[in-house]
Amino acid sequence: MAMPRNACDTHAHICGPIERHPYSERRVYTPPDALLPAYRQMLDTLGVQRMVLVQPSVYGSDNSVMLDAMAKLGNAARGVAVVDDEVSDAELERLDAAGVRGVRINVVDVAEGKGMIAMEPLVALAQRIKRYGWHVEFLMHADEFPGLDRLFADFPVDIVLGHLGYMKTDKGLADPGFQALLRLAERGKAWVKLTGPYRISTGPMPHADTVPFAHALMNAAPDRVIWGTDWPHVMVKGAMPNDGDIADLLLEWVPDETLREKVLVANPAKLYGF
């Protein structure tokens, strides 16, 4: 598939080199080095010109590897950082100047357990980042939050979910959590990334069971859907996905060329300030 000019990969991680940037002792996985030159080569091959680096959990709130890569990439890059609740105003200013446009919250791997979020500190953080125009990106399973639309109805900033809602496709389109996500996106409060089909599919490539979910998202909120490679595909068991094949899934997910350009160019430009 030919990518439109200024197409954006909204979800990728830079990891390593491990001998210079050791990982957090609290990590749940240890990735191999996934360095900036390899990432840029992949994007050049696909024809993608803009990118959003997302802080991987293996570094905790030390965003230095991501920020270094963003500095090398220049204005073509934006970032989503991880910060502590007590992050200083000066640090938020520094991150904003560096191109960070959101903070990431990992719900999947936290102690609260399934379907639980500590909302009070989260709302406090959202109120602090609102003045920068940032959003909060969640690593969470939509099916564990059937009241997602009520939970975030009055949230101070937009939220972003990856992996088409990050729930197994055998849960079905009628799953209450997925339907709540659709309502939230339709109301202009949530964005959803078309990423990581191998994380939710119950079948092999080309993951045909993900197509109805992509179509449901596009039908509900075409202005709130974005795309990403999920490079370097951390914690994937089995064969490593081919990034060209993953990109070509867009032809099934968003068959209309005009809408596909919106997903790849206009929508991420709005969310990340390109």
Image: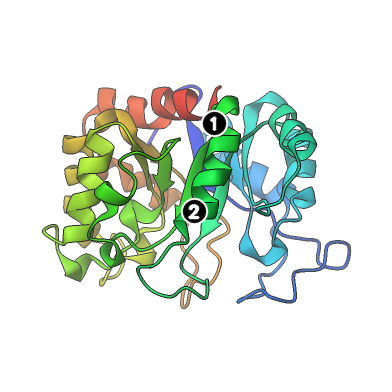
Foreground of the two, 208 or 11: 11
For the residue marked with disc 2, what is the amino acid?
Glu
What's the distance in space between the residues labelled 1 and 2, CA to CA? 16 Å
Residue at x 42%, y 42% (from the top left corner): 159
Q: Position of residue 210 (x, y in %)?
A: 24, 57
Would residue 53 be found to the left or right of residue 201 on screen?
right
The circle on residue 130 is 1
Nearest to the eye among marks 1 and 2: give it.
2
Q: Are marks 1 and 2 in contact (CB under 8 Å)?
A: no
User: Residue 255, relative to residue 210: is it above or below?
Assistant: above
User: Residue 100, relative to residue 141: is it above or below?
Assistant: above
| Element type where label 1 sits in the image | helix
Q: Position of residue 230 (x, y in %)?
A: 50, 53
Q: Position of residue 262 (x, y in %)?
A: 34, 25
Foreground of the two, 140 or 269: 140
Would residue 128 be found to the left or right of residue 63 on screen?
left
Q: Position of residue 243 (x, y in %)?
A: 48, 52
Question: Dot 2: within a 10 Å radius of its alpha carbon, few (fewer than 14), some, or many (20 or more) residues?
Answer: few
Kindly tell me whether residue 185 is visible in this rendering.
Answer: yes
Q: Quadrant of residue 270?
A: top left
Q: Earlier in the sequence, mark 1 or mark 2?
A: 2
Residue at x 54%, y 31% (from the top left corner): 130
For the residue marked with disc 1, what is the amino acid?
Lys
Residue at x 47%, y 61% (from the top left corner): 118
Q: Quadrant of the N terminus?
A: top left
The residue at which mark 2 appears reads as: 120
